[in-house]
Amino acid sequence: PPAEAAKLLAASPPRWIADLGANVGIFGLLALSKYPEATMVGLEPDPENRELLERCVALNGLEDRWEVVDAAAAAEAGSLSFLAGHSALSHAVEPGAENAITVEARDAFPYMEGADLIKVDIEGGEWALLGDRRFATLAAPVIVLEVHGRGSPDPYPVAGAIGLLEEGGWHTKVTGRAPAGEDPDAGLATVWAWRA
């Protein structure tokens, strides 16, 4: 994290972490090893990823600190069409898309409320969360977000995400960008957001 966010995390280590798009558990392992008093929830809808995530939790003996939820993080509960089996690039698709499966979608806001650290990497699903009026009311002092072009309402997705975060009262810093020429639907940037 940027120095400002790292300072907040050091001063008040996270006790509750929400990992939206937990994938196979790399972020989770890092977070739980860095913050040994923390507990975490990880939402992951891709069956292959989730199987590896559950193995990761078990092999590291973290079942009492790390809850895995078999669902996609969304702005409202329901179901969605999902292109699974693409590792970190699995994502929601339009209903009827070829090779799509149906997965449960959970309202992510109850998982984020009260979180001290939120990680969002949901391959374009972040736009529904960022655009929800509840997002600005979250008390999390630190958020790390992977910004995607897929689903962006803004022709400049990184600037659009930063604008929405800053409207919610967070300070922001881009800490990584995809190289020029990358797939516009892939992750475009990692954005850290923090507020006291």
Image (spheres, rainbow, N blue to C red):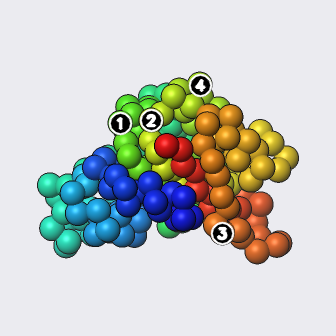
What residue sits right under mark 1 in the picture? Answer: 114
Dot 1 or dot 3: first in sequence order is 1
Q: Which residue type carries mark 3?
A: Gly
Q: Residues within 10 Å of mark 2 (few under 14, many from 20)?
A: some
Determine the CA span between mark 1 and mark 3.
Answer: 27 Å
What amino acid does circle 2 point to? Ala
The residue depicted at 29 percent of the width and 62 percent of the height is 35
Query: x%, y% of residue 185?
Result: 72, 58
Q: Is residue 84 visible?
A: no
Three-letter amino acid code at the position of disc 1: Gly
Q: What is the distance, in whole Å, between disc 1 and disc 4 at their CAs?
A: 16 Å
Q: Which mark is residue 139?
A: 2
* Mark-to-mark CA distance, 2 and 1: 6 Å
Looking at marks 1 and 4 on the same chain, the residue that comes earlier in the sequence is marked by: 1
- Where residue 163 appears, x then y in whole percent? 73, 42
Which element is circle 4 on?
Answer: loop
Assign a secondary structure to mark 2: loop
Q: Earlier in the sequence, mark 4 or mark 3?
A: 4
Front: mark 2 or 4: 2
Left or right: residue 73 versus residue 40 is right
Question: Residue beneath label 3, please?
Answer: 176
- In this rendering, is residue 47 above or below 103? below
Point out the tag, 2 or 1, that comes first from the N-terminus: 1
* Residue topped by disc 4: 133
Circles 2 and 1: CB distance less than 8 Å?
yes
**Numbered disc total:** 4
Q: Residues within 10 Å of mark 4 (few under 14, many from 20)?
A: few
